[in-house]
Amino acid sequence: MVICSLICELLIPGCRSLKEKRSQIKPLVERLHREFNVSAAEIDRLDSRDNTVIGCVMVSNQHAFSEKYMQQVIRFIEDHYQNLQIIHFRIEWY
């Protein structure tokens, strides 16, 4: 069994309030769960209005499969959420 996590730091340019931030991040988290069947949540920088950290986790039986899958999540964010900028990401296995 492989547990794979993706930690993704995002910049939200032009965001003026926490309410506006939440209105952009909540649909992203819900869509990641729906499209990729991963557990996803905003895990850090909750009180910052212009950046956030999103965490995604999945369980698999193959290391290579889980890495490829998380790379697809990153590409999905880049392609479908162009108002968000990925500052940094890391993939870890347990």
Image (cartoon, grey):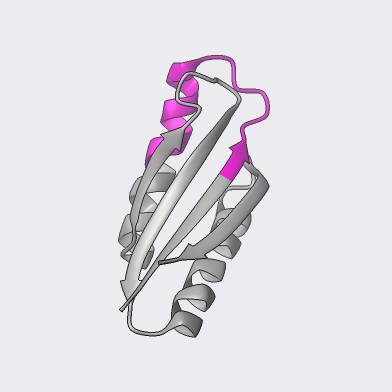
Q: Residue at x 55, y 48 (%)?
A: 8
Which of 52 and 77 lies nearest the eye of the viewer?
52
Q: Residue at x 37, y 66 (%)?
A: 36
Q: Residue at x 50, y 83 (%)?
A: 64
Which of 36 and 94 lies nearest the eye of the viewer?
94
Image coords of residue 39 (percent x, y): 31, 55
Image coords of residue 91 (percent x, y): 54, 62
Which of 93 and 29 lies nearest the eye of the viewer?
93
- From the viewer's perspective, is residue 41 above or below residue 39? above
Residue 1 is one of the magenta-drawn residues: no
Q: Quadrant of residue 38?
A: bottom left
Quarter of the image containing the N terminus?
bottom left
The magenta region covers 9-26
Q: How many marks?
A: 0
Residue 25 is left or right of residue 8, and the answer is: left
Residue 44 is left or right of residue 37, and the answer is: right
Quarter of the image containing the C terminus?
bottom left
- From the viewer's perspective, is residue 49 above or below residue 37? above
Image coords of residue 53 (percent x, y): 51, 39
Name of the residue lying farthest toward the top: 17
- From the viewer's perspective, is residue 69 above or below residue 61? above
- From the viewer's perspective, is residue 43 above or below residue 48? below
Q: Residue at x 33, y 48 (%)?
A: 30
